Image: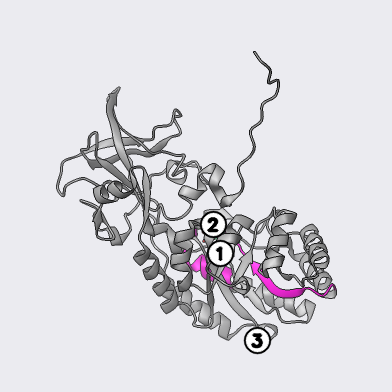
Amino acid sequence: MKPMGPIPPEFGMANPLEIGGKSAEQWAGEGNTPLFVYDIDIVRARAAALRSSLPKTLDIHYAIKANPLPAFVAAVSPLFDGLDVASSGELAVALDSKPASAISFAGPGKRDGELEAAIRAGATINLESSGECDRALAIGERLGITPRLAVRVNPDFELRGSGMKMGGRASPFGIDILDATNVVARLRAAGADWRGFHIFAGSQALDSSAIIETQAATIALAGKLADEIGVAPPLVNLGGGFGIPYFNGDTPIDLPLIGNALSAQLDHRPDTLAESGFAIELGRFISGECGVYLTRVIERKESRGETFLIVDGGLHHQLAASGNFGTVVKRNYPVAIATGAPGAPTETVSVVGCLCTPLDRLADRVTLPIAGVGDIVAVFMAGAYGRSASPTAFLGHPLPAELLANLRQS
Ligand SMILES: *Cc1c(COP(=O)(O)O)cnc(C)c1O
């Protein structure tokens, strides 16, 4: 038997599961399994918790790559001050619900067409390299539009304990500290609208003191760079990195502690940042816990003493739960039998998807109420990096073409 992570408190013990007042069977009646359900009330609760804990002057942005479903973005956008996007597909979604002035575009590989779309719309581009700065300036000149450009800095520190490190090393993300001031000088000399700094040091951190340390280091770094340039950045985007408890032993972050520390840091910030605005951008903290993936058992089998529930979904929809997305060790997301009854006897089972690969395992030897064909399995924590982080849909990039060579009348 292997443990699983905690079910988000809003779903209780999940026996039987209700999402937004409806049973799993009712949702399956509306959408057929497999399907995702996102409870917007849970996003509202996370937004309220952020607002009540974090400094009032801090802008809170939603990084829509965590869940870019257009209807979802439209529903949650009013709760946040801005949207961060990572492709021109996401930019188009964001523009439906926020003005371009509240949208920023990050990502290490923005194509010319994507830079052009952002410049035409008036969104802020977070520059990730000196070459990208040149391309953005040239496109702005060709279009006769002043581009809004911020510089993403590759910090010389990392977010300790973060699930995905994005700083403190050689990196495709952001511009190295030593080059950052040169790039700012170049884009200002070219007449671009310099929007400030973006510093993102990591993701999925559950250690509140590490988050506090990183925010302090980020503010100090922005102050040092602003001193060198001699101009205050209009905005300092502090990144995010707030994690959520996916696995056994994970505990939620302490938002009031983080908020109090950040208030004190902003009160005592370097003089050069006195006039600057501040923002954070969060993806999974906002959308992760609101989502449930529902998938129906199509077969139950025993093999060499182990029991398998074979379901109609799999890693093609929920790659992260299968442990094949940014994790080294396979650990279990929280799962439940959504059609189970309270107090039912339990057993140890593995929940596997319908794909023909041993990687397609949604839960490995977990303890669940005894279930059979027709029951519905719920996989929690499916609101961020779920459906859209299945490989071809990630970030809304276009599908690759598939071409045939040697095509002749065989
Ligand atoms: C992915 C990403 C985010 C969101 O990260 P989460 O871990 O989902 O909060 C924020 N900003 C940038 C630049 C990103 O690339």
Measured from the top left, where is residue 405 in percent x and y?
70, 24
Direction from residue 34 to residue 274 in the image, left or right: right
Q: Which of the two labelled residues, at mark 2 and mark 1, occupies the earlier sequence position? A: 2
Amino acid type at circle 2 is Lys
Is residue 278 at least partly visible in the picture?
A: yes
Q: CB of residue at label 2: within 8 Å of ligand 1?
A: yes
Q: CA distance from mark 2 to mark 3?
A: 31 Å
Q: Nearer the viewer, residue 103 or 322?
A: 103
- CA gap, disc 3 to disc 1? 30 Å
Residue 188 drawn at (x, y percent): 81, 75
Local crowd size for mark 1, using a 10 Å CA cut-off: few (<14), some (14–19), many (≥20)? many
Judging by the rendered image, the residue that carries numbered circle 3 is 274
Q: Which residues are magenta?
A: 190-215
Question: Which of these two is toward me, 149 or 55?
Answer: 149
Mark 2 burial class by Cα count in 10 Å: few <14, some 14-19, many 20+: many
What secondary structure is marked by label 2? Answer: helix
Task: Please give the residue where the numbered disc 1 appears in the rendered image.
Answer: 94
Which one is nearer the viewer's eye here, 59 or 177? 59
Residue 4 x/y as whole percent: 34, 47
- Say which amino acid is labelled 3: Ala
Q: Residue at (50%, 49%) from the top-left corner?
A: 388
